[in-house]
Amino acid sequence: MQKKRKTLTDANLLLTITIVVFFLMYIGAILFQGKGFLKPQTFFNILNANAALLILSCGMSVVMITGGIDISVGGVTALVSMCCAVYLDYHNGNVLGAVAIALAIGLAFGIVQGFLVAYLDIQPFIVSLAGMFFARGMTTIVNTNPFNVANEEFVALKNVRIIIPGMGSLNKLGKYVNAYVEIGVIIAILVVIILFCVLKWTRLGRFFYAVGGNSQSALMLGINVKRTKFLSHLLCSLLAGIGGFVYFMHVGSGAASHAMGAEMNAIASSIIGGTMLTGGVGNIIGTFFGVLSLSTIQNIVSSAGLDQAWWTGITIAAMLCLFLVIQSVVMARKKK
Amino acid sequence: MQTKKANKLTVSELFGKLLSQQIFIPIAALLLLAIFNLIADPSFYKITYGINSAGAPVLSGYLMTILDYGSELAILAVGMTLVTAASGGQDISVGATIAIAGSVILRVLCGTNSRPDTLQAPIIVAFLVACVVAMIFGAFNGVLVAYFKIQPMVATLILFTAGRSIAAWINNNELPIISDPVFSYFGGFIPGIPIPTPFFIAAAVVAVAALALKFTNLGLYTQAVGINESSSRLNGLNPAFIKFLSFVILGLCVAVAALIKVSRLSSINYSVIAKDIEMDAILAVALGGNALSGGKFNLTASIMGAYVIQFLTTTLYKFNVQSDALPAYKAVVVIFLVVISSSVVRDYLRNIGSKISKKGVA
Amino acid sequence: MKDKAVLEMKNIHKNFPGVRALQGVDFTLCEGEIHALMGENGAGKSTLIKVLTGVYGKDEGQIFIKGREDEILIKSPEEAQKAGISTVYQEITLCLNLTVAENMFIGRENNVYQNWEKMNTDTTKILKSLDIQAEATQELGSCSIAVQQMVAIARAVDMECKVLILDEPTSSLDEQEVEKLFKLMRDLRAKGVGIIFVTHFLDQVYEVCDKITVLRDGKLVGEYEINDLPRVKLVSKMLGKDLDEKTEESKKYRIYEKKSGAVPVIETEGLYSNGGIKPFDFNIYKGEVNGFTGLLGSGRSECVRAIFGADGILGGTMKKNGKTVKITKPIDAMKNGIGYLPEDRKVDGIIGDLSVRDNIIFALQVLRGFFKPFTKAEANKFADEYIKLLGIKTASANTPIKSLSGGNQQKCILARWLLTNPEYLILDEPTRGIDIGTKTEIQKLVLKLAGEGMSITFISSEIDEMLGTCSRLVVMRDRKVVGELSGEELSQSMIMSTIAGGEK
């Protein structure tokens, strides 16, 4: 009689590793870096600064779960920022119009890239590499010089602070200050929740997993593989558009150098969060913790006095490398 | 009369042969660009003989710029072609590893002082150290790809992310400046020779590559592994090692390119040096008509491709396109190339072609 | 369309580049019958099924399904499911990263939301009714292969289908599970479902099937009632040798006279690999031609792959000329003078984009080493020599090998190994998928080489080819060596009965 033993699946194993790593890191930060990390606002600032990354990473996870990859998201973010900035300041646009522009850019990238990958069967990496360079180049073409947006409506929106009730800390003057988050964080959390539900409870979400797990089998099981791949890229680019706007709300400026390397951070977050490069395995909750781990480590590095820019790059790459090798080992074990 | 007929036949035959040659693609692209420039502004082809700021006689003009600045790309194209052929993927960390290798060269030359009056080590030593370091980083990529079986582009993502940071770290984020004029020869001119040195270095690398292909089985093994890994294994090859080797060779090419790059400035800018060069190198391989999914390759075509890209870049610069906007144009070229070479589009075109010919018969 | 027929396929043609996989095959399936589809490797069974389920498009022919007046077009597995055809494929085509329940239901329902609770309870019910030892919420990848196969079967059965296709579903099941499957099949038959059953286990065919359709070389051989076709006759139909010829069968068989005191060129003891074969003993002497025979999937290829070090060796010893040698990878075998022409020419043999010349010199070149490439003149000399010797039809030595016909490709691979001048040459299905002229040429060549002192193991699906060349046959069934025939035992009937399991 076979035992009804619950085995730890690969997906859960990777997720557990991530969550444990995050908490160890945060506790370590509190122990060794002093009380800064005990303040709720430190944590919320990490969220504020990385809300856009969180959204980008969610999109990246979806594509990676479906077995693809999209490295154009950073470029799209920069392009969205620049287009919105130009629209708001040079054309006296309103915020709603800017949101529409952001979504339209995301959709356009999604449709083109998705079509090339799904229906013309071109490697997603090449397609999105070209997408990245196109977006970066277009950003410069739209406007060369970086500038801060002065549009009043937008600045008001950018400065909205949402107070977290019951949390706060004393500032340097000994005054009690409430902890707050920006609007972007709310959007990011919503995206996380919605995507979690989509991946878990909708047919499409499960198709993503099936196609990423084994596209040939998925075809045999009666799934429209091409459409599923197309939709995954569409969703990712659309989220890049939204993420781009959130990024724009955080920085309040347009610049060609915005979100440089964001695609790498998004991929790293997804991988650290337990999404398998080979597809089929991944979880939005994991991605959430992946982003937190990544941004916490950045925070630790900079508050440890190692604020030279290179440490962040090296630590992220080291984490990425570590988790890639873990995945490779898990895959090798699975094949046996 | 008869000889004329025979001539005609050979001309059409020649044309047919040329069309079927892989090298036709970069040549056609080159011709297209050349004609465009000829019509737009013939002064593009003007080469002047003058004296440069260092007082040496040099040739200058857009064509010389292409020969000069296409060198690093041509050198990288050699390694990138091998990596593409063997692994069916591309290395996107070459720009970052150039930064590392360049940083190593400067570090060895300067020692602890970032602005030394005299070099702290012979240039050749610095270069050899950079070669070893670059090959180690190549080997790192190679191990991830060949033995951990991670897709090449994702495996090289690690160094793409970290490379420039590592480069900055090697020199403590200082910007060393070399004042020795000899060092600047590699990226500029050797006094008395009016042709830029990088061109000679590129020619030397190409010559070494050609010799390596002639006197070893590198070409045969690489192609065999890229075309059919299973069959290669059954014929006694070790596919993993061949893939690994291709990444190490690319590391060597990176070191040479890095020498030219740092010599041009006699210094380094970690975040800008060799920026976006990975895109150009991949594009060179694709323009050379080599399949990005690996297998058969033609090195000459890749090198041609590299110069075609530099031709394109120089042309765009001439028309006042900003350097930051260049990638947008190149991305369009890439997409065009991959779309027409995708199997789906080819099948579709073939179907249409056969339908038309069927109709013609009917 | 006949009254009772639930599925009718007429005059189905399907070509792949260079291969005519199906040539005018008809197939009829009636309500409430279990219909075996039999044939050797490459006969076209899997292609026929993939055409039926929309994985491949057909080039010609019509498909009719009960309940629809006109011809039905099936363009994807999705549409096949909707038309009431459910399939269990030879290789497991489920997603290992999903749960058992999801694999049961994904791609079948049209609602946007996924109701996990209902799905899990439904699945638990089905699993219980079929007595499958798995939980609905378990990840499929963590189940044994047998359970995975049962889940695939459960999924197919649970769909309200008119036609159920089982393409070698039993290869990974144990006896009890096979029994369960058979009970299930009989229940479905009683409900009027038509079942197509593909298997290479003859016992199973005779246990559950009502009718047999035999395919060979992409053509229909015939449709038979199970009682009209005894086992040996079935084997003869599959192998393409009419048993009536038995009386005319000449007493000609090949004999190898071993010199006294001779040591085998190659001798294995208890060798086995991760290819899934049981440990086997084997030997071959100088100048001998012997062969492995057995039906598809009996393990004959895996045996020679183990000798060549192509699969991971798990145990056993190997001696060459009496001395123990260690062979763990192909290069070891090559250095020991072993050559291996693989079964699957396209996947393991040719290097498609390379020229005929490079393909011919490849193995010798690898043996010679990285730093000693042949000059172009040397390579051309070798290539031209063998192109002439074997009569390879190619425009030039520069032509890419993939543009040659199958037979000429095979000759190039043969040339590749002959060039290394091996002491022992393994030829796994060298004659598959090539024209008759080339087939006889290759057989003659094998005999000539053996005459010159080369030891050769020859594997073929066609028994007369084996009889024409081999002086000793190792018979395999179910991945085990079950017998060795030589001398007078070398006859069609004896081989067939040994393959079939000692019955007539």
Image (cartoon, rainbow, N blue to C red):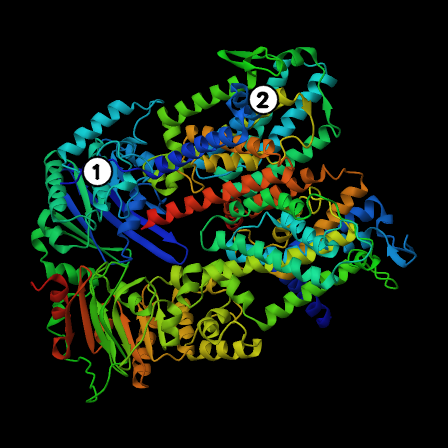
- Answer yes or no: is residue A44 visible: yes
Q: Position of residue C476 (x, y in %)?
A: 18, 65
- Which residue is more in the foreground, C111 or B29? C111
Q: Residues within 10 Å of mark 1 (few under 14, many from 20)?
A: many
Q: Position of residue A323 (x, y in %)?
A: 46, 42
For badge 2, the amino acid type reads Val
Q: Chain of mark 2?
A: A
Q: Which image quadrant for residue A50?
A: top right
For badge 1, the amino acid type reads Val
Q: Residue at x 46, y 61 (%)?
A: B239
Q: Is residue C444 left or right of residue A73?
A: left
Q: Residue furthest bottom?
A: C260
Q: Residue at x 61, y 28 (%)?
A: A77
Query: Which secondary structure lies at badge 1?
Result: strand
Query: Which secondary structure lies at badge 2?
Result: helix
Q: Which image quadrant for residue B74?
A: bottom right
- Residue receiving disc 2: A246
Mark number, residue C163: 1
Q: Residue at x 15, y 72 (%)?
A: C484
Q: Residue at x 68, y 25 (%)?
A: A82
